[in-house]
């Protein structure tokens, strides 16, 4: 295995990690305030669709990204109202939204464009790829960082910003206190429900940005059920990273690596098993994490 092949896998890993990391950060923020949000898939998928639709009709990358963020945040607002404010069951709300958005995007794809399956059009404007001349000429590093978009870099900045907010600011401590003990936090004047709802909307915006990265990052197109379970992989990444923004980076990179290896193996092994590699890794990682957590609790007791 030569260095060029390894660099190609690392590059694929970084590109595959971006939507997972952004959604995982959204999930981690919800977990930090005590909200179990399983509608990540819906928030990502609606953003995939809306960003491509706006891209098709306007040709503006900025408006497309904003549309993806706004659509994800809108679904997040629905979750916030139903699940946080009105105490609806989280499994019912999340599952219903995932199924609803999946069906709605398929229906709207046919209504708006008269297409089934996917939308690929030469009028779609691809997101700008960053290739710095100085880095591009470096043999290994140049291939690793080749054709990455601004979102591929921005996701790590967002993770660092969320870490600073949660653990280095007064507002962050108030946010964490809601997740630790909402009643106690409210007794001290913290508006627990309002904070939870705001964080769920923020989670939707992050998932929306992740969905935009998926549909416009490397390939500018939309396909039915485009997320293909990435929302659930993001939940696993958040769990493995213990809902800590910096640790979530590494857990997301792990799942991104699994996807990168799966894509690389497709050129060698002609089997659908390679596409299932990220999902197999998710199950294995969660089982190992659950066993480790259970062992730790037994030792403490």
Image (tube, rainbow, N blue to C red):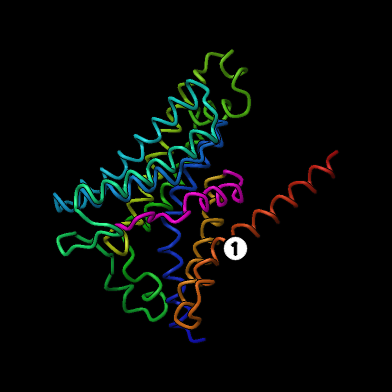
Q: Which residue is outermost to the bottom?
A: 2
What residue do we see at 62% from left, 28% from top? 180
At 45% from the left and 32% from the top, the residue drawn is 199
Residue 140 appears at what percent x and percent y?
A: 42, 79
Please state the horizontal and vertical placement of residue 161, each as a whole percent of the image: 44, 43
- Residue 131: quadrant of the picture: bottom left
x, y percentage for residue 295? 80, 48
Toward which corner of the image does residue 74 lie, by quadrant?
A: top left
The local crowd at label 1, few if under 14, some if 14 to 19, many if 20 or more residues have their Cα within 10 Å, is few
Instruction: Write down the region rendered in magenta.
Output: 222-243
Q: Is residue 100 left or right of residue 49?
A: right
Residue in front for this viewpoint, 230 or 197: 230
In the depicted view, which residue is nearer to us: 161 or 25?
A: 25
Return the residue at label 1. 280
| Image side of residue 71 versus residue 173, left or right | left
Give the residue displayed 40% in from the left and 39% down from the top: 204
Quadrant in the rendering for residue 77:
top left
When the figure is inspected, residue 246 is found, relative to residue 122, above or below; the finding is above
Reply yes or no: does residue 34 show up in magenta.
no
The image shows residue 173 at horizontal and vertical percentages of 54, 29
In this figure, what is the number of numbered marks?
1
Q: Secondary structure at mark 1?
A: helix
Q: Is residue 143 above or below residue 61?
A: below
Question: Which one is nearer the viewer's eye here, 14 or 93?
Answer: 93
- Is-magenta flag for residue 234? yes
Residue plotted at (49% across, 62% down): 256
Q: Give the side of residue 197 with respect to residue 174, left or right.
A: left
Q: Is residue 9 above or below residue 161?
A: below
Pick the quarter of the image with the C terminus.
Answer: top right
């Amino acid at each position: 295995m030569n260095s060029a092949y390894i660099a190609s896998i690392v590059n694929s890993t970084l590109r595959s990690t971006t939507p997972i990391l952004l959604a995982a950060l959204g999930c981690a923020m919800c977990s930090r305030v005590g909200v179990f949000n399983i509608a990540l898939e819906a928030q990502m998928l609606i953003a995939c669709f809306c960003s491509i639709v706006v891209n098709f009709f306007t040709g503006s990358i900025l408006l497309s990204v904003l549309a993806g963020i706004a659509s994800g945040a809108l679904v997040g607002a629905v979750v916030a109202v139903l699940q946080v404010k009105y105490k609806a069951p989280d499994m019912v709300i999340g599952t219903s939204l995932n199924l609803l958005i999946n069906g709605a995007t398929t229906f709207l794809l046919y209504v708006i464009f008269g297409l089934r399956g996917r939308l690929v059009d030469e009028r779609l404007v691809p997101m700008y790829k960053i290739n710095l001349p100085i880095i591009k000429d470096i043999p290994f590093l140049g291939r690793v960082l080749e054709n990455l978009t601004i979102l591929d870099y921005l996701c790590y900045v967002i993770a660092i910003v969320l870490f600073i907010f949660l653990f280095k600011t007064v507002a962050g401590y108030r946010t964490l206190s809601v997740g630790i003990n909402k009643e106690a936090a409210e007794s001290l004047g913290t508006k627990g429900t309002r904070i939870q709802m705001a964080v769920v909307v923020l989670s939707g915006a992050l998932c929306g940005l992740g969905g935009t990265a998926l549909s416009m990052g490397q390939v500018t197109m939309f396909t039915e059920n485009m997320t293909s379970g990435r929302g659930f992989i993001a939940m696993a990444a958040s769990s493995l990273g213990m809902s800590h923004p910096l640790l979530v980076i590494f857990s997301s990179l792990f799942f991104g690596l699994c996807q990168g290896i799966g894509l690389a193996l497709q050129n060698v092994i002609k089997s659908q098993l390679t596409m299932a590699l990220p999902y197999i890794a998710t199950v294995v990682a969660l089982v190992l994490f659950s066993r480790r957590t259970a062992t730790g609790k037994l030792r403490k007791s």
